[in-house]
Amino acid sequence: MTSTVDAAPYTVEEVCERFDPVMGLEVHVELNTATKMFCGCRNEFGAEPNTHVCPVCLGLPGSLPRVNARAVEGAVKIGLALNCQVRERSGFARKNYFYPDMPKNFQISQYDDPIVFDGHLDVPLDDGSTWRVEIERAHMEEDTGKSLHMGGATGRIHGASYSLLDYNRAGVPLIEIVTRPILGAGTRAPEIARAYVSALRDVIQGLGVSDVRMDQGSMRCDANVSLMPKGATEFGTRTETKNVNSLRSVERAVRYEMGRHAGVLLSGGTITQETRHFDEQSGTTSAGRPKETFADYRFFPEPDLVPIEPSAAWVEELRAGLPERPWERRARIQTEWGISDEELRDLVNAGALDLVADTVEAGAPAESARSWWVSYLTQQANTAGVELAELAITPADVARVIALVAEGTLTNKLARQVVDGVLAGEGAPDDVVAGRGLAVVSDDSALTAAVDEALAAQPAIAEKIRSGKTKAAGAIVGAVMKATRGQADAARVQSLVLERVAAGS
Amino acid sequence: MSELTRLSAAEIARRVQAREVSSVEVTRAHLDRIEAVDGGLNAFLHVDREVALAAAEAVDAEIAAGTVRGPLAGVPVAIKDNVATSDMPTTCASHILDGWRPPYDATVVRRLRDGGLVPLGKTNLDEFAMGGSNENSAFGPVRNPWDASRVSGGSSGGSATATAAGETPLAIGSDTGGSIRQPGAFTGIVGVKPTYGTVSRYGLVAFSSSLDQIGSFGRSVLDAALLHEVIGGHDPNDQTSIDAPLPPVVEAAYAGARGDLAGVRVGVVRELSGEGNQPGVLAAFTDAVRVLTDLGADVVEVDCPSFTYAVPAYYLIAPSEASSNLARFDAMRYGLRIGDDGSHSTDEVMSLTREAGFGPEVKRRIMIGTHALSAGAYDALYGKAQKARTLIVRDFAAAFEYCDVLVSPTVPVTAFPLGERVDDPVAMYLADLCTIPTNLAGNAALSVPCGVSADDGLPVGLQIMAPALADDRAYRVAAAYELARDTSSGTPFAETIPEPAVLETTS
Ligand SMILES: [Zn+2]
């Protein structure tokens, strides 16, 4: 494919001297339901090609779809989290077009009665302000399979000598979230695009209904961009940049398209309504396969399915169970823990915020919880080369270790050995304490005996202590700690030594 | 013709289950009959003697061990070839499915097997069930046992002819605009379109999803009812399936044959029962209505003015859905593939395959439907047709408020000569005039033979329509009529079906 010759991009500042940008963002989110949208096949990323397929998701003649109730639940949750209204009666529709990775050559989607509609998301921006993005609708549909184009240089269909088809993804539940046109963003348009997708990702992650991994395609963004002369009210011709697969790329793609549009328009050209591909390497977009500007999908009501009618009581139940918005949670946590912006950022960057919060929720003091996760456990994660969250220890385990230290069962040193045991798969903290025999020796009679023994073994030192040189007690404490293999509380031993000497031992 | 191939399904079941005859003997008799007459009739597209006999043997062994799977255990059955079978090909009488064997059984096929019925094979049809004469089959037309120069009707022509000619006592068909009732009428047997949603469509290769309905053929009302109860009932694999008990159709067939029709109000649909009918058809129908009156029914005339929109509405809705349903036949995953020689793109292979694999009527309907759904035409065509559909539903509702059942001729004409209407699709489509309203409204209807037309000696069908989920009413009236008809003539109508002339293979 010959790439189109692009006019030299202008910076967004230059663009916005002459134009107002208009953006529309369409985000597809794959739900992480156990099974697919319309059949019982497993919904799993990365399996051997064509192993999660059946007559329904292969669209075999005679097969019929069956709606996955969990997918409807996921869609409603997303809608509620985006402040949308939930439609009382919402139907499926067929979107007809031919493509080899779509087994029926139509996609079951929704058309004029999406399950949720008319919402908004208040998106936090870097400077601490928020930007309200209006949500037009979110609807349910099924994902397509995947084509692998072989033998060509580009991996695209053009120039390939043959294609392989994997239908594992065919029929995976997909929610498409469509914004209303985003107006008035000016030079901040690229930032707002990224911040919106980021906020959406965080919200959906908080709901637990999708993995929202842009790198794995479980969250995909199409960015529509157009320019209109400053002060105009009629939108310019838009382009749609498809499948932008990272937050950074969303920002770059919007910035690039704004500059490119301005270049074309300012040189007297016109923008072609088309889909474009974003190239990560060069940070530029190129025209997609030339196709007619108007695709007629011949939508009509899906006759194999009956409309969905979510009951008001069920919707309210879901609404009541919605989690806090991630950024609101962060703000609350910061206040409650009394930590600085910088400390909060460190926690977030270390991927420790949720872990610390969950540890606090499991009963630990914020300070200890934070300390465990950002120091010792972060070191262990770095050593093992894994993410903090991937360590084989739960926030509840960490909270238990902290409690054991607080009640005197463990010293800090022993506590680290217990954590090592948990990480090594020896079980829960209490199992490790029991298994390794790590509890602090707190039985005073046993300790007293050990102290007496040490004093008897070093009468000269005992005499020094008796004469008031209490610093000499350190040698006795050391001997006792050695004798108890470190499992005694050193402070307790120290006071016992002084007590026994005073008692004339 | 063996005596066994003249028996009703009910009688075969009784004898097999009483071990007076084995299912293997019955099955072999029907397989022999197929071998003897089907070369000329072309009702079957696929018959596997070994598989059928093995199934029969298994049923015999179970019965010998004291297990009877159901009321029709041991009885052979034929299956229209647009219903998925895991042990037989499923062609839809189209080359586009060449070589395809489904990896699964349709729900009705599973229910047949679970009920101990013995599938004999797959029957011919109009390609993808699109047609009313069975001349649109890629494997040649089906001939009418009453007159081999005439059509069997369609689209379930193979199932109808096979049942009429004694090749099988029972058959499964599908009815989208009359495709069971019309060939049933043309071949002189009983054909039933149950209430939409009461027999699972899972595994029926879709023509028009909102209209398609699987149903039963038999040579008697009771036989059709017995098969109906085996295949009917809720199926979670079909979301349009109604989660309600199946109407008691067997009980109704017995009740009808026992009693009179006192207190039953029968509405004659004026729009379907007048001058538009062939004189012999109208005479036979009028005579049937007189019999109903004699049985004590309260016969009235009713108007269903919107029925006149039924044919045009149907010929927009059905092709629209078909254009989408048939999009999957693209050579990518199964069936025919043309042009895969390295010199054609994927799009070209799809086009070449669809060009070669679909017959002209299928292409015509795909094009009509594609147009009717297109952005510029949707409101004026598909949208308007759906509005007409709503009016037809209302006409039925109003009529059923007053009447228990409605009646009309099943088809305005008798079986026409092969080739006569091939080049006149509109004339072909008008043959569906009386049957289509029921598909659009989703209620129940059946066709029961009501004698022969004086014009040509060919059978005529009486259509009895009942409200949704009241299929039993149609059975009750049909069974009462059937008994009165046979009593007055002195010979069961099924025994008057002539022995088909032995013809050269037509396919
Ligand atoms: Zn599947």
Image: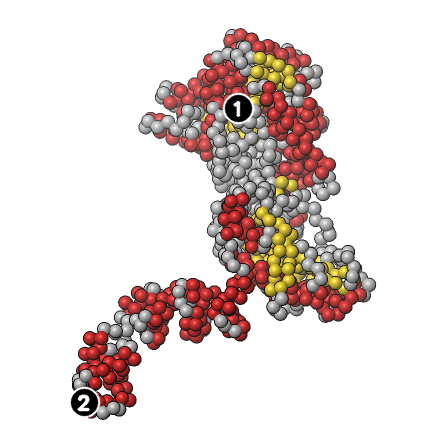
- Residue B471 shows which numbered tag? 1
Residue B291 drawn above or below residue A383: above
Chain for disc number 2: A
Residue A436 drawn above or below residue B125: below
* Residue occupying image coordinates x 65% and y 45%: A112
Question: Does residue A430 appear to the left or right of B311 in the view shown?
Answer: left
Residue A154 appearing in the image:
no
**Mark 2 nearby-residue class (10 Å; few <14, some 14–19, many ≥20):** few
Chain for disc number 1: B
* Kind of residue at disc 2: Pro
The location of residue B103, given as percent across then percent down, is 49, 41
Residue B248 appearing in the image:
yes
Quarter of the image with the C terminus of chain A in it? bottom left
> Is disc 1 placed on a helix, strand or loop?
helix
* Residue occupying image coordinates x 46% and y 13%: B258
Please tell me which residue lies in front, B31 or B439. B439
Question: Does residue B377 appear to the left or right of B481 in the view shown?
Answer: right
Please tell me which residue lies in front, B280 or A364. A364
Question: Does residue A217 appear to the left or right of B53 in the view shown?
Answer: right
Question: Does residue B400 appear to the left or right of A474 in the view shown?
Answer: right
The location of residue A51, given as percent across then percent down, is 48, 51
Please tell me which residue lies in front, B159 or A329. A329
* Kind of residue at disc 1: Asp
Quarter of the image with the N terminus of chain A in it? bottom right
Please tell me which residue lies in front, A5 or A175. A175
The location of residue B89, given as percent across then percent down, is 52, 36
* Residue occupying image coordinates x 48% and y 14%: B257
Residue B105 drawn above or below residue B175: below
Rounded to the nearest angstrom, the CA distance separating label 1 from label 2 is: 108 Å
Q: Is mark 1 within 8 Å of ligand 1?
A: no
The residue that mark 2 highlights is A459
The location of residue B445, given as percent across then percent down, is 57, 23
